[in-house]
Amino acid sequence: MFNIAVLPGDGIGAEIVPEAVKVLNAIGKKYGHSFRFTDGLIGGAAIDAVGVPLPEDTLKLCNESDAVLLGAIGGPKWDTLPVHLRPEAGALLPLRKALGLYANLRPAILYNALINASTLKREVIEGIDIMVIRELTGGLYFGEKKREKTPAGQSAVDTLVYSTEEIVRIARLGFEIAMKRKKILHSVDKANVLESSRLWRETVTELGKEYPEVELIHMYVDNCAMQLVRWPKQFDVIVTENMFGDILTDQASMLTGSIGMLPSASIGGNVGLYEPSHGSAPDIAGQKKANPLATILSAAMMIRYSFNLDREAEAIEDAVVRVLDLGYRTPDIMEDNGKPVNTEEMGDKVVEQIIG
Ligand code: IPM
Ligand code: MG
């Protein structure tokens, strides 16, 4: 029995999460596992119900579960609240921190069936399969922040701190994952300017001695942003700090055509958190237009990384490939001759492929 905390959150979260639950139930049935789902409140939905974006009950539920499935949080309705009450800074970041999830894995895989959905040329993107590993609980997003009045107005400070220990644990994961793939690791920093990046680079270089088989390439973040669109096939595994990873993963997602396809896993603590890389898309919420595949693929990452169910994870991923090959498309990945489906129908198609 695997206990899963389910936090649909806001916007399209309530539409996409049930599709992933449906798929997990199909997997359970086919392979003889039982998944128990318990819903919790987070984000704007929690603010509306109980006045805070990350209720104690939710944190307790997550800590007592084997894994967490999250939809998406945030929306214009809550954007004007004080920062500690906003869904992003008040719920998502503290939840990651509280669960000790220092590593965020965001794979950018191009599905052949979607090659025309990308804005980039076929020869540039064909076959890309990149794993971006983003440090998730340190750096600029968690450093001390300050506002001060000055004679001319105000000044604002954000602090970027990394310790050797924080760098070693994320870089080690980078090397370990690279060992299981093509053994090429790009470590991305801004060591020509930032002291934290210089420590990053020194530390990663030192650790690299333990992994002589891995080709370690240091790259500045600005160059990496350029290389990602110029020739993405040079990348296999990228490891980088929090803010650079935030930016580069949005960029990498577009290589694959739609951010609606990209799952993510946040790991490192006792309980992993799995969520699509996209946001709550308030503009399409409630219209059954959202693509549930990123959430479904996040469920696949959950059973692989948290439950060690590799075969079952592959069954989900293969089912998604077949559904795309059969031509089913939500609006975000629609193309000529695509077969239009809504959120629920897309989930059903994946289930059909799993059940066979
Ligand atoms: C992401 C998001 C979050 C982040 C925001 C919503 C705080 O952009 O998961 O990439 O920056 O980590
Ligand atoms: Mg982001």
Image (tube, helix red, strand yellow):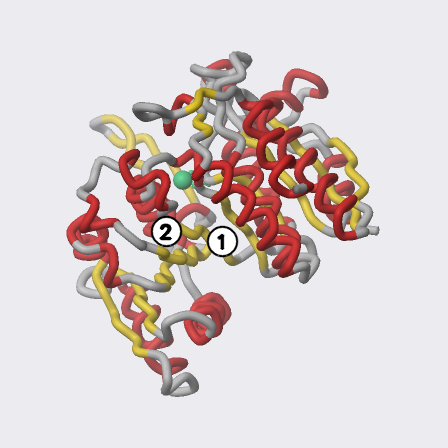
Looking at this view, is 185 or 16 the one in front? 16
Looking at this view, is 260 or 157 the one in front? 260
Under circle 1, the secondary element is: strand
- The reply to whether residue 168 is in sight is no
Which of the 4 image quadrants contains residue 162? bottom left
Cβ at disc 1 under 8 Å from ligand 1: yes
Under circle 2, the secondary element is: helix
Q: Look at 43% across and 58% down and name the residue there.
A: 133
Rendering coords of residue 232 (x, y %): 24, 55
Is the Cβ of the residue at disc 2 closer than 8 Å to that at disc 1?
yes
**For the residues marked 2 and 1, what is the alpha-carbon distance in whole angstroms?**
9 Å
Mark 2 or 1, nearer chain start: 1
Q: Which mark is residue 278?
A: none
Which of the 4 image quadrants contains residue 17? top right
- The reply to whether residue 236 is in sight is yes
Circle 2 Cα neighbour tier, 10 Å, few/some/many (<14 / 14–19 / ≥20)? many
Residue identified by numbered label 1: 104
Rendering coords of residue 61 (x, y %): 77, 41
Q: Identify the amino acid type marked 2.
A: Gly
The correct choice, above or below, for 352 with respect to 200 in the image is: above
The correct choice, above or below, for 83 with respect to 233 in the image is: above
Q: Look at 53% across and 49% down and name the residue there.
A: 318
Q: Ligand 1 is found in which quarter of the picture?
A: top left
Q: Identify the amino acid type marked 1.
A: Asn
Q: Which mark is residue 245?
A: 2
Q: Look at 38% across and 45% down and name the residue there.
A: 111
